[in-house]
Amino acid sequence: MFKDKLHRGAWSGLRTTWTLVKIIVPVSLAVEALRLAGAVRSMSDSLAPLMGALGLPGEASLAVIGGMTTNLYAAIAVMKELPLTWQQATILGVWLGVSHNLVSETLVWR
């Protein structure tokens, strides 16, 4: 009985890990590609005043947009690529915790 539960738990954990890897790795690569192309800089410069009012760098707008339109895992992948202080990571985490996946949540709420 214990062996069966351990087996099912291990497979469940591996499936969850694989799901997260399928989201986080491509998003991380996309953010890095956008950064190298200069798109992150132009986007962050235009949204820097809004992000600055919240104590965040302009680059955090990528995580906000990703989290609000898709899911928290995309936002986490973007956050991983940003040089955030612990205070900025906390602000961003709270913001995304409240506003994650707005598209689906709005449809469900209606």
Image: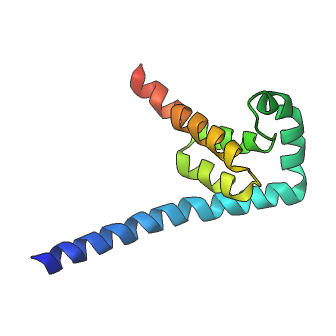
Side (left or right) of 16 relative to 102: left
Side (left or right) of 38 relative to 17: right
Image x and y of residue 74, in percent:
59, 51
Side (left or right) of 14 relative to 4: right
Image x and y of residue 53, in percent:
79, 27
Please give the name of the residue rendered at 63% of the width and 56% of the height, measured from the top-left corner. 77
Front residue (pair 24, 103): 24
Q: Residue furthest bottom?
A: 3
Q: Residue furthest left?
A: 1
- Quadrant containing the N terminus in the rendered view: bottom left
Front residue (pair 31, 49): 49
Does 110 appear above or below 14?
above
Image x and y of residue 32, in percent:
78, 60
Image x and y of residue 72, in percent:
54, 46
- Quadrant containing the C terminus in the rendered view: top left
Please give the name of the residue rendered at 52% of the width and 32% of the height, measured from the top-left corner. 98
Please give the name of the residue rendered at 46% of the width and 30% of the height, measured from the top-left corner. 105
Does 83 appear above or below 53?
below
Query: How does the figure colour the protein chain or chains?
Result: rainbow
